[in-house]
């Protein structure tokens, strides 16, 4: 079972506005180049790649979203996380009437959660 996002997935979340400080793991060392007064260039340690864990992603996802459905305006839709034994995949989304929106589907739970979190951000449903 995969418990961390890849460095690339973590970078996507940061680019979408999630604070790197919310990542609880560290990946590879990051170096920046610095030009010295004599004209030479030096690589200087600048920290570590932030890596988001399964727990981090779960804590970032809203447990419910408020949106307009066919039933009413400002409907409260809870998160839905389920394993489909037939497909051997996780389905993560929000129970929107009349059908759930399964925005994250993957054999790895963290990847399904990641897709759902990206969708939440893109839909401006992430509460600050």
Image: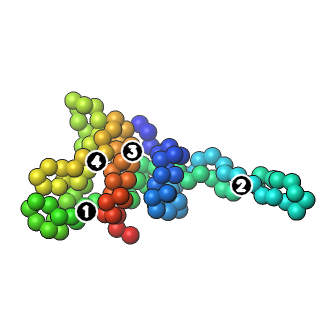
Indicate the secondary structure of the residue bearing disc 2: strand
Quick one: label 3 or label 4, which is nearer the N terminus? 4
- Circle 4 sits on which residue? 103
Q: CA distance from mark 2 to mark 4?
A: 37 Å
Residue 121's spot in the image, x, y percent? 37, 59
37 versus 111 height, above or below? below
Q: What residue is rendered at 18% in x and 53% in y?
A: 95
Q: Residues within 10 Å of mark 3 (few under 14, many from 20)?
A: many
Q: CA distance from mark 3 to mark 2?
A: 30 Å
- Circle 1 sits on which residue? 65
90 versus 123 height, above or below? above
- Circle 2 sits on which residue? 32
Residue 124 lies in what quarter of the image? bottom left
Indicate the secondary structure of the residue bearing disc 3: helix
Quick one: label 2 or label 4, which is nearer the N terminus? 2
Q: CA distance from mark 1 to mark 3?
A: 20 Å
Quick one: label 1 or label 2, which is nearer the N terminus? 2
Q: CA distance from mark 3 to mark 4?
A: 13 Å
**Which image quarter is the C terminus in?**
bottom left
> What mark, if any, has residue 110 been given in the picture?
3
Q: Nearer the viewer, mark 1 or mark 2?
A: 2
Q: What residue is rendered at 86% in x and 54% in y?
A: 40
């Amino acid at each position: 079972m995969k418990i961390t996002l890849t460095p690339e997935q973590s970078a996507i979340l940061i680019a979408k506005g999630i604070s790197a400080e919310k990542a609880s793991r560290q990946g590879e060392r990051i170096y920046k180049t610095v030009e010295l007064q004599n004209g030479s260039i030096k690589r200087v340690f600048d920290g570590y790649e932030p890596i988001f864990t399964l727990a981090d992603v779960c804590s970032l996802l809203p447990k419910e979203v408020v949106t307009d459905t066919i039933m009413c305006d400002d409907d409260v839709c809870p998160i839905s996380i389920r394993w489909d034994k037939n497909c051997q995949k996780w389905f993560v989304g929000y129970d929107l009437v009349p059908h759930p929106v399964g925005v994250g589907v993957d054999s790895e739970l963290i990847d399904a959660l990641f897709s759902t979190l990206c969708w939440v951000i893109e839909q401006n449903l992430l509460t600050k």
